[in-house]
Image (tube, rainbow, N blue to C red):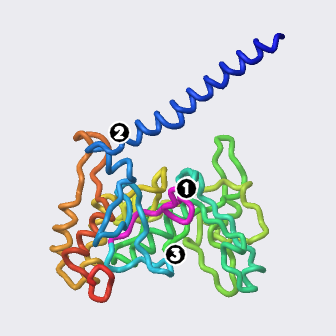
């Protein structure tokens, strides 16, 4: 190939590179940036930052936790729903737990490791989605002074699940011969189970080194109300793990605690909550919701807690 042709082709390639660099590297980002400064778009393009006292405190699009350095809920703040995004509301790890409704059997902790002082997680304990829901419901019930019981949960806050082992009949039923409460491990001393018998067969605690998957796994609804006092969004995370809203029902059960911590009447807190309830989008999409950060900031501005940053 003649040298002149090589020069011509490389020159054309260089021109194309320069033109595309200008368009995609400068012009397009510049147009997008300018568009982001327009009224109505400026807030969104800058992350929908919420400020209080002249400093950023969060984003209106992202939820956050309202806990102390030990991870305990701060009494005078409304609490957000759980988050499975990283360590909680991590925008770089957005996502749900990916656990489904059939995830009801815990992975038990190694008792030998527990005996050495290891925490349950380090000892191998992995709670099922059911046990996570049960534990959260019980804790929230105790914190908010409401009944934390819910179907398929034990009074101790784990999944009420049995492995029923026995003889299978021709119609697929099981004649029980041995029944084990799979989420209640055997411990030293008396270890009561959530129910003493199932169809006349005594219920045992689970042993760490035994496999109960050969039995029929049976969740037990129990006598908890079908409509629990602790709503679903209080015990489950959103698909993104970043939802900044809670339901009005979850806000309602927190009113008395927040009012007591701030030293005001519950009616005053309930009035502020009502002002922050957003209806369904376009009147039919989604559910009514309460923006937790905006609600807490409004409370801080009206009824600051002495000794906190909000009151200084």
Tag 1: Cα neighbours inside 10 Å, few (<14), some, or many (≥20)? few
Residue at horizontal 29 percent and vertical 79 percent from the top: 310
- Residue 244 located left or right of residue 131: left
The range drawn in magenta is 78-92
Front in this rendered view, residue 23 or 58: 23
Whole-percent x, y for residue 116 in the image:
75, 85
Which callout, 1 or 2, points to the residue nearer the camera? 2
- SS of the residue under disc 3: loop
Residue where numbered disc 2 is placed: 35
Judged from this view, the residue extending furthest toward the front is 4
Looking at the image, is 75 positioned above or below residue 37?
Answer: below
Number of the label disc, if any, that sits on residue 261: none
Tell me if mark 3 has few (under 14), some (14-19) or many (20+) residues whose alpha carbon lies within 10 angstroms of its own: some
User: Which mark's residue is nearer the viewer, 3 or 2?
Assistant: 2
Q: Position of residue 149 (x, y in %)?
A: 42, 69
Q: CA distance from mark 3 to mark 2?
A: 55 Å
Which one is earlier in the sequence, the residue at label 1 or at label 3?
1
Where 7 falls versus 147 (above or below)?
above
Classified by dominant secondary structure, the portion drawn in magenta counts as loop
Residue under label 3, please give it. 156
Q: Secondary structure at mark 1?
A: helix
Sequence order check, earlier mark of 1 and 2:
2
User: Which residue has dot 1 on it?
Assistant: 92
Q: Was residue 126 drawn as part of the magenta stretch in this picture?
A: no
Q: Compared with residue 173, is residue 54 higher up or lower down, i.e. above or below?
A: below
């Amino acid at each position: 190939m003649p040298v002149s042709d090589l020069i011509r082709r490389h020159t054309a390639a260089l021109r194309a590179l320069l033109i595309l660099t200008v368009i995609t590297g400068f012009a397009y980002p510049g147009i997008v940036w300018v568009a982001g400064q327009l009224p109505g778009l400026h807030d969104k393009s800058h992350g929908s930052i919420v400020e209080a006292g002249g400093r950023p405190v969060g984003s209106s699009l992202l939820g956050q936790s309202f806990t102390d350095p030990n991870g305990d809920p701060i009494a005078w703040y409304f609490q957000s729903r759980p988050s499975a995004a990283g360590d909680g509301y991590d925008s770089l790890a957005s996502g749900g737990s990916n656990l489904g409704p059939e995830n009801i059997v815990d992975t038990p902790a190694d008792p030998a490791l527990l005996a050495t002082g290891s925490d349950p997680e380090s000892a191998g304990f992995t709670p099922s989605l059911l046990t996570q829901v049960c534990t959260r419901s019980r804790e929230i019930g105790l914190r908010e002074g409401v009944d934390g019981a819910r179907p398929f949960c034990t009074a101790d806050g784990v999944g009420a699940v049995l492995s029923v082992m026995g003889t299978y009949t021709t119609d697929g039923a099981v004649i029980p011969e041995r029944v084990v409460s799979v989420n209640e491990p055997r411990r030293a001393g008396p270890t009561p189970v959530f129910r003493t018998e199932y169809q006349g067969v005594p219920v045992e605690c689970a042993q760490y080194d035994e496999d109960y998957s050969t039995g029929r796994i049976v969740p037990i609804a129990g006598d908890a109300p079908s409509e629990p006092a602790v709503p679903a969004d209080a015990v489950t995370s959103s698909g993104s793990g970043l939802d900044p809203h809670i339901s009005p029902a979850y806000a309602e059960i927190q009113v008395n605690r927040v009012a007591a911590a701030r030293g005001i009447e519950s009616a005053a807190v309930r009035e502020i909550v009502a002002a922050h309830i957003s209806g369904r989008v376009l009147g039919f999409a989604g559910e009514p919701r309460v923006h937790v950060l905006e609600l807490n900031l409004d409370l801080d501005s009206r009824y600051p807690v002495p000794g906190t940053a909000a009151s200084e």
